[in-house]
Amino acid sequence: MAVPAVGMRGWTARWGPESVLALFAALVFLGFLGSVDLWGKREQRASAEAIDTIDHGHWLVAQIQCRPRLEKPPLPRWTIAGLMRLTGRRDEWMVRFPSALAALATVGLVYALGRRLADRDVALASGLALTSLGFFISELRQAGNDGPLACFTTLALYAAWRRLHAEGAEPGARRWSMVFYLALGLGFLTKGPIILLLAGLTVVPYLVCVGKLRVGLARLWDGWGLLLFVVLALSWPVPVLLADPNAARVWWLEMGQKAGMAGVTHHRQRLPLAADWTWMTLPWVVLATTAVLLPLMPHGRETRPRIWFPWWWAVGNLVMFCFWSVAKPNYFLPCLPAAALLIGFEWVRLTRLARVPDAQHATLARRLLQMHWVLLFAASVVAPVFVRRLAPEFLGPCVVVSLAVAVAVLLSAWAWRRGADALALAPLTGAVAVAVLAGYGALAPALNPVHSHRTLAATLDRLLPPETRTVMFFKELDEGLWFYLRGRALVPVPGSLPKYNGAMTLLEEVRSNRLEVDWTKRAESEKNLFVDWIQRPDRASSYVLIRAKDYEKYAAGLAPYVTPILCEEGMQRNELVLLRVNPPGPVARDPERVNPVRR
């Protein structure tokens, strides 16, 4: 049935902008979701955990590298494994789908919170900004714990705002307390107690700033809600501790490494996380930076006190992470929705202020908008020049993206001149959507062979005898091989892996010796362990995988005992060597020895 013109115009005015936001979000987070193989360490681990959960029934504690994976709570793993079992699909799309859903939910919550904090324009601008934040897109298109944590953190803080600012007679106002505690519990099951810090460093300073600390905390207090949180938060740790009391040490070490309390660092030391603010907020660096200063400036008083809520969520937590010994950018991911809200506030403020000729700071507002447009347009012109010189094979998709950005800048400026506020941001978000589709649909898949383990798994199936169902590995492998190598068991060389993780073993070694670890002796001990296993007659398999960098260290001592069958080269990941143990008996240094396959 035809829709009357008036009705169509009314629907467009009422829901058209939100439909544009929903379309862009769907394209950005779902488009070509499975086109890229599993590259990153986090999603390789997530896929290996989910497959182990399904294949071996390890729902309480999954195993990867044939050892218990206790470092991360189980909710993302349960979600991925449940979807795999329900659909019967084991592919990259299904592994990433829960994080993509979390992204869509987070965009919706940011829109809803923006309407509560300000108005429809701020809500739309904030949703469009979050949908186009490059770091948020890249992280939420991967499997892992950080994307769902961002969703539950946003839900908890949205519920907190609803409860704190509900009118006394508002129906169901107290239910938002239950939603708040429910979200905290789900976040705890996603990545542990960090969600309590993220929420606490938002709500408490905000209440202090508005002078309602006692009243606000009293409103958020709910005995049944607290009970719900405790039940959810302890539903996994308690059964795990009953099964393995050493789990507490693993959890303490995992948290202590990041905060610098464990005596051993998780990774190399990093600069304070604030140094990453610029690229974490691309392409809205100008807006994000000026928005951080907004509540502190005299002309920002019109946005106070409500802007303190996203400000403490973003800036307060950023300051907290700067005091951690090891704080990686993905730790800040649950705070990017707050950064998007600050960007939304600032975009709408600037677009409105810049139209008022005689208003104070109107010229500055116009200059900031122009700076943003000019920087994006300049980037669209310069990018093809660099790509042509550095990676000419990607010039075609790059030109398409550059044209989209250039046109989007012109449309954005035109829409602002026509009176649009939030919708002037929509063309720029659309250009980001084009870039995402080009990147994940055309550019990134071309890099799959050098990043993923799909080709390696196919090569192993070709080289290994059909009757060889078990392949050994020495020390560690990238978990992506478990995802792509089907029908064969990967088993560690006995004694080559720690029971829990390398950091715990290293810490125990340092504490027991009260000395620095002697890495030369360690390498010699590892080589002797490997040789001893090779000489055992009861080996589970005569084929073993080892990282190329480890094989280089041991090659001279292993030469009489093994023959390289496959040597990977030119990979942009940990390269592997497949070795075949030589048959027992005298080993001649045969000039006709089999030449290994090199990739």
Image (tube, grey):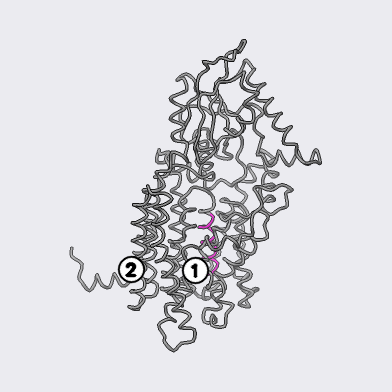
| Nearer to us: label 1 or label 2 | 1
Residue at the left extreme of this rendering? 1
Q: Is residue 42 above or below residue 522?
A: below
Q: Is residue 179 visible?
A: no
The residue to which callout 1 is attached is: 341
Please give the label number shown on residue 162.
none
Could you tell whether 241 is left or right of 461 in the image? right
The quadrant holding residue 69 is: top right
The quadrant holding residue 185 is: bottom right
Q: Label 2 is placed on what type of residue? A: Trp
- Name the residue located 39 percent from the left edge and 69 percent from the top edge: 425
Q: 310 or 218, which is in the foreground? A: 310
Q: Is residue 552 above or below residue 142?
A: above
Please check the rendered image and state whether residue 588 is part of the magenta-colored stretch, yes or no: no
Residue at the top extreme of this rendering? 585
Dot 1 alpha-carbon crowd within 10 angstroms: few under 14, some 14 to 19, many 20 or more = many
Image marks 1 and 2: residues in contact by CB distance under 8 Å = no
What span is in magenta? 149-161
* Magenta stretch: helix, strand or loop mostly: helix
Could you tell whether 7 is left or right of 17 in the image? left
Residue at the front extreme of this rendering? 389
The image quadrant where one finds the N terminus is bottom left
Where is residue 129 drawn, in percent x and y? 44, 65
- State the SS at label 1: helix
Where is residue 292 drawn, in percent x and y? 56, 71
Could you tell whether 11 is left or right of 282 in the image? left
Q: Label 1 is placed on what type of residue? A: Leu
The residue to which callout 2 is attached is: 15
